[in-house]
Image (tube, rainbow, N blue to C red):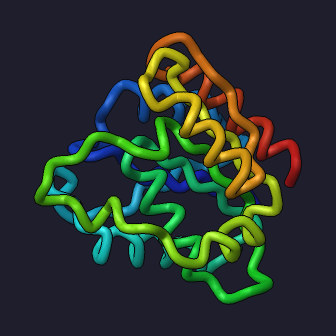
Amino acid sequence: MVPRVVLIPRHGGTPDEPLVAAVAAGLGPRARLVQPAFLRPEAPRIDEWAPIARAQLWERPRETIFLGLGLGCRAALHALSALRPGIAVGGLVAVGGWHEPLPATMSAWDAPISGLERARSALGGRCVALLDAHAPTAEADAGRWETLLGGQVRRVSGPPGAEEVLAAATVLLDRM
């Protein structure tokens, strides 16, 4: 079976963004990019997005890699934290920081994520975080990904692009 890379978009993200098209093309026959319909990307709600992400894990979780862009990283973490113990997933490519500046109307996204130990267990070290080395929260974010989730952090100069995302996804696909 072909592994799935499930895209969880950024705040305001759309399926027709150049990064998404480049990642889909770059994966080629090695993996299939899946883009679930997330509700209201311009005004996302964690209570809607996390269950949509988690639903992608019902079938073949071990062959599923989450690709979280910005806010999508937090939706992925909420979904992984709600899994039953013992469920392993293919991994997580986290593009962007742990904390993305959010409008006050989206404060629920900033709430602490309970169950991070379940997320860490489900990932089993299969987490690659791509961070803009120049972002003001880069060092704190790197520490969170490494310490809390056992993730590998790659710092890039500027926002991560398709080449870095594909390289990170390849690391996880090679472990399957």
Residue 86 lies, in percent from the top left, at: 79, 84
| For residue 44, above or below residue 122 | above
- The residue that appears at 49% across and 48% down in the rendered structure is 68
User: In the depicted view, which residue is nearer to us: 99 or 24?
Assistant: 99
Residue 119 lies, in percent from the top left, at: 66, 69
Give residue 65's quadrant in the image.
bottom right
| Residue farthest toward the right in the current orientation of the protein | 175
Give residue 69's quadrant in the image.
top left
- The residue that appears at 26% across and 46% down in the rendered structure is 11
Residue 110 lies, in percent from the top left, at: 34, 60
What is the number of callouts on the image?
0
* Horizontal arrangement in the rendering, residue 51 relative to residue 124 (left or right): left
User: In the depicted view, which residue is nearer to us: 31 or 105?
Assistant: 105
Residue 100 lies, in percent from the top left, at: 35, 42
| Residue farthest toward the bottom in the current orientation of the protein | 84
* Horizontal arrangement in the rendering, residue 117 relative to residue 15 (left or right): right
Quarter containing the C terminus = bottom right
* Horizontal arrangement in the rendering, residue 48 relative to residue 161 (left or right): left
| For residue 95, above or below residue 134 | below
- The residue that appears at 86% across and 42% down in the rendered structure is 174
| Residue farthest toward the top in the current orientation of the protein | 157
Regarding residue 4, the answer to whether it shows in the image is yes
